[in-house]
Structure formats: structure tokens, C-alpha cells
Image (spheres, rainbow, N blue to C red):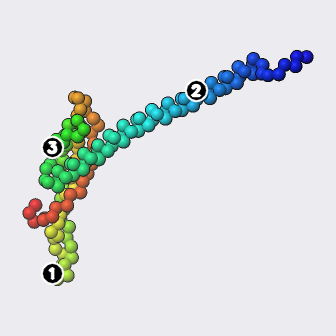
């Protein structure tokens, strides 16, 4: 009998193979995580710019603009709007003894916008905005 202490060649090969697989799997998981993180940060930046653009359009709508172009982060963003509905709500006035038209009215406006950078158009975004008008009699 051979009483040699230590590991045999087969045991060492199995151990090295398991260690290599563990390292490769860890590297693969980390690589996928980094790729996901990069994609997620790009998408978040796009969504933040869309929200910023939406806020700029709402400010323009309140200034009674109905279309325009806004430059945002090197992109030319064209937008247009269409009035879907205008309504002046009535309210009950106890002194008059009935319903009267309010001084306020609202417009429901559909807005559509898309951006162009380096002659490449992005996705078209749409939203609906409820715009309150302060003096309904002037409209």
C-alpha cells in the first residue's frame, strides 16, 4: 500500500475545475448586472428628460401656445396640441337661488411630441392635460 499524504491529481483537477466554474459564474453575474445597470441608467435619463419636456410644454400651454419647438439636451423636440373639450362648470349660488356659470372653465388638451437628434427621430409621446382657465367669459 502506498501511504502518501496529499491530494491525487484527479482531486486537484476537480477542485480547480470547481473553482474556475465559480469564478466564471461570478464574473458572468457581475457582467450582466453592470450591463443592466447601464441600460437602466440610460432609460432613467430618457424618462427624466421626457418629464422635463412635459413640464416645459405645460408651461407653454398655460401661456396659450398650442405648438412649438423646445431644445433639450441637444435634441430638437417638436410638439403640438389639440383642444379636445372645453367646459364651464356651473355651481349653485344660494343668493341667486339657482345654478350659475363659474368664472373658471377647463380645457382638456391632447399633446403629442417627439424629439430629433442627428436626424434620428425618437419615440412619439402623447399625454392629456387639464388646463384651468381663470376667466371663462373671455374665452
* Residue bearing mark 3: 68
**Badge nearest the viewer, 3 or 2:** 2
Q: Quadrant of residue 37?
A: top left
Residue 18 lies left or right of residue 7; in this view the side is: left
Q: Nearer the viewer, residue 100 or 58?
A: 58
Q: Earlier in the sequence, mark 3 or mark 1?
A: 3
| Distance CA(mark 3)–CA(mark 1) | 44 Å
Towards the viewer: 127 or 49: 49
Could you say whether the residue bearing mark 3 is in a helix, strand or loop? strand
**Residue 44 placement (x, y as % from top left):** 36, 42
The answer to which of marks 1 and 2 sits earlier in the sequence is 2
> Does residue 87 lie above or below 16 as drawn?
below
Q: Find disc 1 in the rendering and name its residue.
A: 96
**Circle on res. 24:** 2
Q: Quadrant of the C terminus?
A: bottom left
Q: 85 above or below 29?
A: below
Residue 136 relative to residue 51: left or right: left
Q: Circle 1: is it few (<14), some (14-19), or many (20+) Cα within 10 Å?
A: few
- Estimate the spatial distance between the alpha carbons at disc 1 and disc 2, rounded to whole Å: 81 Å
Amino acid at each position: 500500500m502506498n501511504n502518501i499524504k496529499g491530494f491525487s491529481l484527479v482531486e486537484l483537477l476537480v477542485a480547480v475545475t470547481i473553482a474556475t466554474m465559480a469564478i466564471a459564474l461570478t464574473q458572468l453575474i457581475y457582467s450582466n448586472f453592470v450591463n443592466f445597470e447601464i441600460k437602466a441608467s440610460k432609460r432613467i435619463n430618457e424618462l427624466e428628460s421626457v418629464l422635463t419636456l412635459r413640464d416645459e410644454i405645460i408651461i407653454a400651454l398655460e401661456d396659450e401656445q398650442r405648438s412649438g419647438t423646445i431644445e433639450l439636451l441637444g435634441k430638437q423636440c417638436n410638439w403640438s396640441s389639440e383642444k379636445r373639450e372645453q367646459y364651464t362648470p356651473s355651481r349653485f349660488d344660494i343668493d341667486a337661488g339657482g345654478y350659475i356659470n363659474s368664472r373658471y372653465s377647463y380645457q382638456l388638451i391632447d399633446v403629442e411630441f417627439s424629439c430629433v437628434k442627428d436626424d434620428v427621430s425618437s419615440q412619439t409621446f402623447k399625454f392629456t392635460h387639464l388646463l384651468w382657465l381663470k376667466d371663462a367669459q373671455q374665452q
